[in-house]
Image (spheres, rainbow, N blue to C red):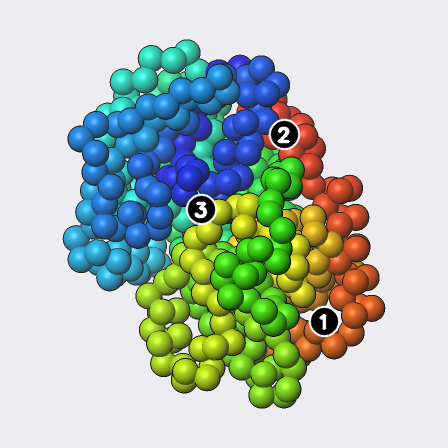
Amino acid sequence: MHILFLTPAYPPFPGGGERYTSALAQELAARGHTITVLTSQALIESDFWKGKNASQPQARSSEEVHVIRCPIGRMPGGRTGLLAWRKSMVVVSTLPGDQSSILAIMARYVPPITEMKKTLEKLTGAYDLVHAFNVSWEFPALLAWRYARRNKLPFVLTPFAHFGTSSKDRVARNTTMDHQLQIMRDAQALNVLTKFEGEGLSRLGIRGNQIVIVGSGAEPLPQFPEAAQVKKHYSMSQPYAMFIGRASRDKGAIDAIKAIIRLRQAGINLRLCLVGQQSPEFIRYHEQLTADQKQNFHILGIIEDEEKHALLSAAQMLILPSRTDSFGIVFLEAWQHAKPVIGARAGGIPGVIHDGYNGLLVEFGDAVGLADAMTRLATNPTLNERLGKNGLATVKHDYSWEQVCDRVINSYHIAL
């Protein structure tokens, strides 16, 4: 098949959804399918509001995948303007009746990928199917849906829907507005990562026969340097836990900071290494800490994948107490190193972590509960080792990209 992907961003953009889309594209291409990816020029999240504006769309071809990257316009008011715009969309969606039409117009700025519509209209490939990703940044999915309808092509959507802690959670409202539901209901196949995501969509009226649980996969471990070498480079000498992801309140990074402070006050020798982009609210929170408190944290930002795996191989545990993850690929990465994990009972995470078997679950926003869970792993080597080994067995048995691709191809047959 010749398959057209539309996604708001694509590697080297460092997000989990972007890595998922890329890994799937590569696996499909390895099976002989032709993949064209239409995406933005975003390299980091702030590009979505600051802009990334080369004069023309940029194309890159390989033997496997053809990627076309479109410019991003600046959002008026920057990040503050984008958040205000998004909040206004949520308010519009709560009005009586179906507000899909006006929301679809507003969605042109989420994100404002200039030239994407025009580029899509100029594509000349004979596509068999259109597959869109991510309804949190839904403009590409909206264009994909319209393109598929106009050209009478099957439309498949991987929404990465976030349901937070409940259907009334702010995070859930961000992915279940009228226009987003319209796109999801109209998809011939809706690929979800966990049963929890599927159940959440079913409650919103999505037909069960549309929903295909495809899961996610663990990429092969790269060759990585000795952990001691990387730790020395980053001046890390004490035992540490790892947080991998966007350092934000919704991802649980601030709760992780609070938990480590509690552990240190209790005399437990554990620091926290944070890898990933930093949100403005996280930066503000960290700046308010005392100099002594700041010494407990290694904030590394975006680092090379090889360095990340070297650090994971020597970590005590991985924590991601997030409410905005539909899966959490970083859990699989930790399990590849036989490390235990801690996640939140929110989003799709309970469909990945089996509490007490390959990790621990805590309530989102409960820094005390997170500290208690971290204390259990830091002070009980037997429990730490058992959960880590069970995690390694889980990833080997359940989470290969070959399995994911088989399920995705099945969803394509459903759509066709």
Q: Residues within 10 Å of mark 1 (few under 14, many from 20)?
A: many
Circles 1 and 3, Cβ within 8 Å, touching? The answer is no
The mark found on residue 39 in the picture is none
Among the two numbered marks 1 and 3 on one chain, the one whose residue lies closer to the N terminus: 3
Between 319 and 185, the residue placed more toward the observer is 319
Amino acid on which disc 1 is placed: Leu
Q: Classify residue 265 as left or right of residue 275.
A: right
- Expressed as whole percent of the image width and height from the top left, the position of residue 89 reads 30, 55
Among the two numbered marks 2 and 3 on one chain, the one whose residue lies closer to the N terminus: 3
**Separation of marks 1 and 2 at Cα, in angstroms:** 34 Å
Say which residue label 3 marks.
14
- Expressed as whole percent of the image width and height from the top left, the position of residue 211 reads 60, 38
Q: Classify residue 170 as left or right of residue 199.
A: left
Residue 416 visible in image: no
Q: Quarter-wise, where is residue 217 in the image? A: top right
Q: Quadrant of the C terminus?
A: top right
- Expressed as whole percent of the image width and height from the top left, the position of residue 364 reads 56, 70
**Separation of marks 1 and 3 at Cα, in angstroms:** 28 Å
**Separation of marks 2 and 3 at Cα, in angstroms:** 22 Å
Say which residue label 1 marks.
377
What secondary structure is marked by label 3? Answer: loop
Q: Residues within 10 Å of mark 2 (few under 14, many from 20)?
A: many
Among the two numbered marks 1 and 2 on one chain, the one whose residue lies closer to the N terminus: 1
The relative height of residue 405 versus residue 14 in the rendered view (above or below) is above
Residue name at image x 48 percent, y 47 percent: 304
Q: Residues within 10 Å of mark 3 (few under 14, many from 20)?
A: many
Between 203 and 13, the residue placed more toward the observer is 13
What secondary structure is marked by label 2? Answer: helix
